Each structure stands twice: as structure tokens, then as C-alpha cells.
Image: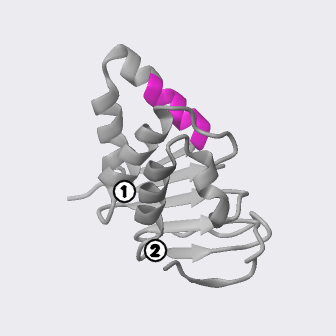
Amino acid sequence: MRRGYDTVFSIHAKLLGQLASARAVGTYERKLGALTKADLLIIDDFGLKPMRSGQDEDFHDIIADRYERRSKSITSDLDFSEWNDAFHNKLLGAVTLDRISTSNLAIFCPSRAVLVLPLRGALVMSSGQDSGQFGREK
């Protein structure tokens, strides 16, 4: 019998810092496992600070391990077309963003005052030019 819904919330930069600390003390796999197993992972302020070398690999690991298995919600003040700029490794960024956007609902809105419901896949909120459009990312 399942006892509840496990949700993890973190600011993007803080989450990457926690993973770097976990790697330094030898608990990276355990930390990554906890992020992978949570029913819903909410990552706020994606791309507010560009990722440094290695951080983009950690972020990719999170997304890859959750891909088509668990729900995730990612918020950003960037337009989705600008998300790849946050990655140090642009090829890794393209692959990671493909996994985020493939078969997932994206909501673009000018305000962060949006009710976020747990959805299978990624919920993307942005204040970009596409504000007010609702639909599936292709």
C-alpha cells in the first residue's frame, strides 16, 4: 500500500550544488537515486545561472533517469528557445532539452502565478514571446 505522494522541490542552482556536494563526499548515486524515485520533481528557476562544466552532466543525469518514468515540473523565466544557453556543453544541452520537451505538456505564460498540477512529463513555464500559448512541445 502506497503511503503518499513524494515530491521534491529545489531551485535549479541549489540542486546542482547539492549534487556537487554529494559527489565530493561519495553520496552522489544515493542523491541521484532519491531524485529519480520521487513521484514529482519540481525544479524552479532553470537557467537563472548558467551551468558550469560538470553541472550540465549532473542535470542531464537527473532528466535521463526520470525520462518517461516520473513526472517533473521545470519553471524558468527564459523562453524555451533560450534554455540551451544555460548549458556549458551545447550538445549535451540539446539532448537533455529533447528529453524534457518530447511528448510533454508545455505552458507558456507571462506570470508565474499559475496553478501547477502534477503531470506525467514536464510542465514548462516561461515569460517569453510565446506567452499565452498552450500546447504540446514538438
- Left or right: 105 as drawn, with respect to 110: left
Q: Quadrant of the N terminus?
A: bottom left
Quadrant of the rendered structure where residue 66 is? Answer: bottom left
Q: Which residue is mark 2?
A: 104
Question: Is 8 on the left-hand or right-hand side of 64?
Answer: right
Pointer 1 residue: 39
Per the model, the C-alpha gap separating discs 1 and 2 is 16 Å
Main secondary-structure element of the magenta-colored stretch: helix
**Tag 2: residue type?**
Asn
- 9 vs 34, left or right, is right
Amino acid residing under circle 1: Asp
Helix, strand or loop status at disc 1: loop
Closer to the chain start, of discs 1 and 2, is 1
Say which quarter of the image contains residue 75: bottom right
In percent of width and height, residue 106 lies at 57, 74
SS category of the residue bearing label 2: loop
- Is 138 rendered above or below residue 120? below
Q: Residues within 10 Å of mark 2 (few under 14, many from 20)?
A: many
Label 1 with label 2: CB-CB less than 8 Å: no
Q: Nearer the viewer, residue 69 or 8?
A: 69
